[in-house]
């Protein structure tokens, strides 16, 4: 469900035409048809007008909701709407300090705002290795709060040019940082602060949650 689906659903629910929607929302006539047939997105000013008219945020308007998340109806759907479920993007690659590109997103993870805190600042990704086992295992989906200045003791996601993405416990020292694994099979990685600026070393955020599928004991224990 994209922004256009939400507009059309709003029109059906309120028994109004798209022309009436455009007129009352302060849009140019034919805007909805243009977006539908030419594949355009509304500019930010139009997004603000639409969101204000529908009494939702611009983020909620433009966030793409996977079809399976809206393919049910009845009492269950009412409960979900009342709970204001948010959808956290599960990424194929890290955004760094850039806005999310749709090509980075492989799927979405539903989350209740009260359990996450600020879902709009979060993304999810697959745990890249077993370095933080047993707390975080390879294949787990970790939920990351975007943060470029995490505190010592946080579990962080870190990247640098030409190096694999790391998920480690951050330990800050006077002259640099240590990225400490939980598993004894992995080595700690350290950087001096001047090295971090030169490479650069980028904090994508800190881990605040985990999504894990249940496996049998025999499947989860490696030889």
Image (cartoon, rainbow, N blue to C red):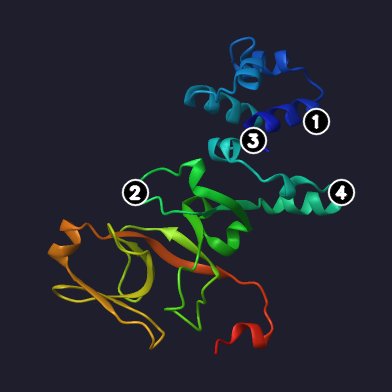
Label 2 sits on residue: 97
Q: Which of marks 2 and 3 is nearer the N terminus?
A: 3
Residue 25 appears at what percent x and percent y? 62, 19
Q: Neighbour class for label 3 at 10 Å: few (<14), some, many (≥20)? A: some
Mark 4 and mark 2 lie on one chain; the one further toward the N terminus is 4
Report how far apart the C-alphas of labels 2 and 3 lie in the structure. 25 Å
Q: Residues within 10 Å of mark 2 (few under 14, many from 20)?
A: few
Image: 46 above or below 146: above
The quarter holding residue 14 reads top right
Task: Give the residue furthest to the right.
Answer: 74
Give whichever of 10, 24 is nearer the camera. Answer: 10
Label 4 to label 1: alpha-carbon separation: 15 Å
Residue 13's tag is 1
Q: Name the residue under label 3.
A: 2
The residue mark sitting in front, 1 or 2, is 2
Q: What element carries label 4?
A: loop
Residue 44 as seen in the image, left or right of residue 96 = right
Residue at 50%, 43% (x, y): give it: 103
Circle 4: is it few (<14), some (14-19), or many (20+) Cα within 10 Å?
few
The numbered mark, 3 or 1, whose residue comes first in the sequence reads: 3
- The residue carrying mark 4 is 74
* Quadrant containing the C terminus in the rendered view: bottom right
């Amino acid at each position: 469900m994209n922004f256009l689906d939400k507009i059309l659903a709003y029109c059906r629910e309120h028994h109004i035409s798209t022309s009436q929607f455009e007129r009352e929302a302060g849009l140019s006539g034919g805007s909805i048809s243009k977006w539908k047939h030419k594949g355009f997105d509304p500019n930010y000013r139009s997004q603000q007008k639409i969101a204000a008219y529908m009494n939702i945020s611009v983020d909620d308007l433009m966030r793409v909701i996977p079809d399976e998340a809206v393919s049910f109806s009845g009492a269950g759907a009412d409960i979900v709407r009342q709970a204001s479920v948010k959808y956290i993007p599960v990424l194929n690659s890290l955004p760094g300090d850039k806005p999310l590109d749709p090509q980075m997103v492989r799927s979405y993870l539903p989350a209740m705002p009260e359990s996450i805190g600020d879902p709009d600042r979060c993304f999810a990704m697959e745990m890249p290795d077993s370095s933080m086992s047993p707390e975080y295992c390879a294949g787990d989906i970790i939920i990351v709060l975007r943060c470029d200045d995490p505190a010592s003791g946080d579990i962080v996601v870190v990247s640098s040019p030409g190096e694999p993405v790391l998920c480690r416990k951050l330990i800050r020292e006077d002259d640099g940082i240590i990225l400490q694994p939980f598993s004894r099979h992995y080595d700690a990685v350290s950087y001096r602060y001047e090295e971090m600026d030169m490479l650069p070393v980028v904090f994508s955020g800190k881990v605040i949650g985990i999504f894990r599928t249940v496996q049998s004991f025999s499947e989860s224990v490696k030889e």
